[in-house]
Amino acid sequence: MAETAPRRVTADVAIVGAGPAGIAAAVRAAESGARVVVLDEAPRPGGQIWRHTTRGTLPRGARRWLERLDASGAQVLSGASVVDADGPRLLAQWRGEPLVVSAERIILATGARELFLPFPGWTLPGVVGVGGAQALLKAGMPVAGRRVVVAGSGPLLLAVAAALAGAGAHVAVVAEQAPAAAVRRFAAGLWRRPAKLWQAARYRAGVPRARHRPGVWVTRADGDTTVREVTLTDGRRTWTVPCDLLAVGYGLVPATELPRLLGCRIERGRVHVDEYQRTSEPAILCAGEPTGIAGAHAALVQGQIAACAALDRPAEATSLLAARDAWRRFAARLEATFAPRDELRTLADADTVVCRCEDVTLGRIDASWGSRAAKRYTRAGMGPCQGRICGAALQYLFDWTPDRVRVPVAPATVGTLVHAAALNTEPQDPS
Ligand SMILES: Cc1cc2nc3c(=O)[nH]c(=O)nc-3n(C[C@H](O)[C@H](O)[C@H](O)COP(=O)(O)OP(=O)(O)OC[C@H]3O[C@@H](n4cnc5c(N)ncnc54)[C@H](O)[C@@H]3O)c2cc1C
């Protein structure tokens, strides 16, 4: 195989992730005069929440951040997956070619992903993640007239249900597994965060109150070539709801692969950062959802703090620290309210597929093993998604700790991976 020399980019600050956290970090650093490069595997900046095809449909605040990013002078490399990292160097695959990025500082803003918990029927066509349904909708999936059940946990349920209803779907029920009293307490505390209160009110307006059912969860889905009905329970009674689309997700889990690969300390599943978003590794900072799930507003604040710290000007972030701490408290309330209930651990039966990539059923897995043994004996977590879906689910079901991160952290060609060694050599062709 002919080996192409990797393209090299040098910068003062390299940012992985162009969601709200990465955008805010890039804007703040580039507007201060730093050379900034931003890498994101998505085709356009915006992250999970703002990556709409047309900016015209985005809220004004989001549009302003994206316009500032355009004008900031930061080099934004969309479609660039970071697959390996060593110290302040990154190996990415960009437009099918290898790219080595060297920077004084790296800000990891890799976001979060959905937590899926297996139940009988969750692999049927027509059963999708809540965020997946949102993404399909943004990509133009027609839903008008479809009967939809939205289930799982967290504020995303209402957001997606409202979006589906707005696109003409019939949302039969929004089943929130968190207990009604906990959801009420959380909602009552939202006055402290007017932006969230306004957001919640908008979502509530999109879904009739009677169809929002806290304390209710999915136990199974049935169908043939597609899902036809969903079985729900409130722990006392069980009933079925006909549907042809089931969107289900149990909140978000921080995406920590790159931070873990770089040796950053992880505590309770999130990247540990100090008050200036500095990780335990010198030169590596982290902002947004990898440090805890708190939403886009929190990510924007953290991104700016990380940028100031990356430029060794932490004092410039002082005015942001109180807001960041308030968002941390909000994140703690969010986590406590919407934590998956214990009953969800027992929904899957021996025949339920838990690793979709490798077709591994729950019955083949021994709870005493741990993630690494499960990989060794069954290949669970070794398929194309590299455990992104089943990894968190198995950790939740069996209280396992995550296995060591293996390269590549995102799918890459062999032509890119052969350049992993280039991470340890000096750049010769900076651009
Ligand atoms: C599926 C999903 C749907 C959501 N929908 C909504 C919604 O409708 N409303 C709402 O209020 N909130 C929603 N959220 C939550 C919201 O996206 C976050 O609160 C917010 O975007 C956090 O910003 P962030 O910058 O921390 O992360 P993100 O916005 O997630 O940005 C992280 C970015 O990092 C990139 N990335 C990750 N790993 C790599 C890598 N190895 N190489 C290159 N790039 C990488 C990703 O492509 C992504 O663009 C959703 C979250 C998810 C996961």
Image (tube, rainbow, N blue to C red):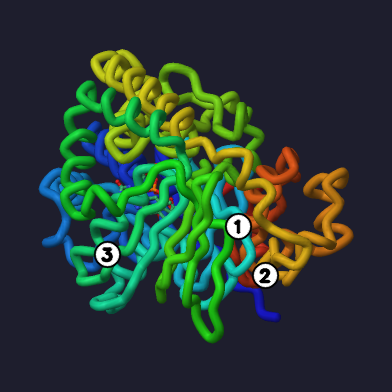
Q: Which of label 3 and label 2 is nearer to you?
A: 3
Q: Residue at x 39, y 35 (%)?
A: 180
Q: Is residue 14 visible?
A: no
Among the two numbered marks 3 and 2 on one chain, the one whose residue lies closer to the N terminus: 3
User: Quick one: SS at disc 1?
Assistant: loop
Which residue is label 2 attached to?
Answer: 357
Q: Are marks 1 and 2 in contact (CB under 8 Å)?
A: yes
Quarter containing the N terminus: bottom right
Whether label 2 lies within 8 Å of ligand 1 gets the answer: no
Q: Residues within 10 Å of mark 3 (few under 14, many from 20)?
A: many
Q: Label for residue 164?
A: 3
Q: Is residue 92 visible?
A: yes
Q: Amino acid at mark 3?
A: Leu
Residue 427 on image: x %, y %: 55, 50
Instruction: Answer with the quarter of the image where residue 244 lies.
Output: bottom left
Q: Considering only vertical position in the picture, is 25 above or below 129?
A: above
User: Quick one: SS at disc 3?
Assistant: helix
Residue 135 on image: x %, y %: 35, 64
User: Quick one: SS at disc 2?
Assistant: loop
Q: Is residue 65 left or right of residue 154?
A: left
Residue in the foreground of this view, choosing between 423 and 68: 68
Q: Is residue 175 left or right of residue 254?
A: left
Q: Residue at x 80, y 64 (%)?
A: 379
Instruction: Answer with the quarter of the image where residue 417 lies.
Output: bottom right
Which residue is label 1 attached to?
Answer: 389
